[in-house]
Amino acid sequence: MTVFRKIRKKLLDSGKLKGYITYALGEIFLIVIGILIAWKINDLNEIRKNRIVELKIYESLYDELNTNLKILNSTIDHYSDTSKRLEATMNYIGLPPSEITEGAKDTIIHINYSETNLLEGALNSVISTTKLELIESDSLKGLITNYPAEIQKLESIDAKIKEIVLDRLQPVLERHLALKDMLSKDNPRYSRIRTFGKSSNYGNLLNSKEYQNSLVDRLIQTQNLLTSAKKLRNRTQVMSLRLKQELGYTL
């Protein structure tokens, strides 16, 4: 800057006004260029920082979605098996007690409910904060913001199944069946309760309207949950693939 001042003073002292104006304009131009370069460097640094944060967001979402894929695959397998067991149980309705085999009794008494718990911590962290604005892809933003609604739909159906099992099926089973049937038949420690305990009445259970309605309702909700879980699995796979591409992972 000292050098520039000396040049300006020299031009003024020599009376070369045109040269001074030309020099002054050149100096202003250099200052503007310097400011623009500094601004651009700062802007590029900000972009780089945002990209680092964006990739961290993608990594957390990718890990969470892959965990959900495993949960959904397990859920679909479980409820597919449950659907078959429920259909098999319906085929026992109307049979005389003598035709209800031990295998049939086992199918009836084991109602096999397990709650589905999907992860959405990383997802909610992105949606409920400014992190969502750091994601550049609008289509990916759309997938992320719509995903919780799909999870809530599945959880709503799962809650209905839980209510059917705990509040309707389990009580009616306990009224007609003896839980001793669930004990190991090979263990001598249970011989006394098996011999003297109250017996089950599978015929009355299967002919109970309350049991039949609960069975049908559970089958309908199980099929609804399977449809929802398969749809959610497809959505999860699409999102996982998009995130994999953004992260530069090998497809």
Image: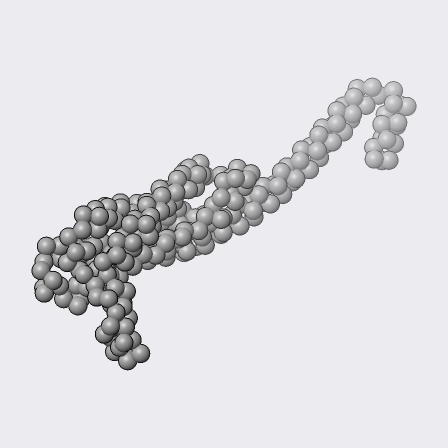
- Nearest the camera: 29 or 197? 197
- For the image, the number of numbered tags is 0
Q: Quadrant of residue 107?
A: bottom left
- Left or right of 94: which side holds 184? right
| Residue 142, horizontal then vertical, whole percent | 42, 37
33 relative position to 228: left or right:
right
Q: What's the residue at 21%, 66% (across, down)?
A: 199
- Image quadrant containing the C terminus: bottom left
Residue 36 percent coordinates (x, y): 67, 33
Residue plotted at (26% across, 53% down): 172
Looking at this view, name the residue that lies furthest to the right.
Answer: 13
Q: Residue at x 47, y 45 (%)?
A: 123
Q: Please give left or right for residue 98 compared with residue 37 in the image.
A: left
Judge whether residue 191 can be spotted in this image: yes
Quarter of the view holding residue 89: bottom left
**71 sits to left or right of 222:** right
41 and 225: which is toward the camera: 225
The residue lying toward the viewer, choosing from 17 and 100, is: 100
For the N terminus, the quadrant is: top right
Classify 128 as above or below 185: above
Q: Is residue 19 visible?
A: no
Q: Is residue 180 above or below residue 95?
A: below
Q: Nearer the viewer, residue 105 or 97?
A: 97
Q: Which residue is at 51% across, 43% downward?
A: 126
Residue 86 occupies quadrant: bottom left
Q: How is the rendered protein coloured?
A: one colour
Position of residue 36 relative to residue 173, above or below, is above
Residue 7 is situated, as x and y percent measured from the top left of the image, at 85, 30
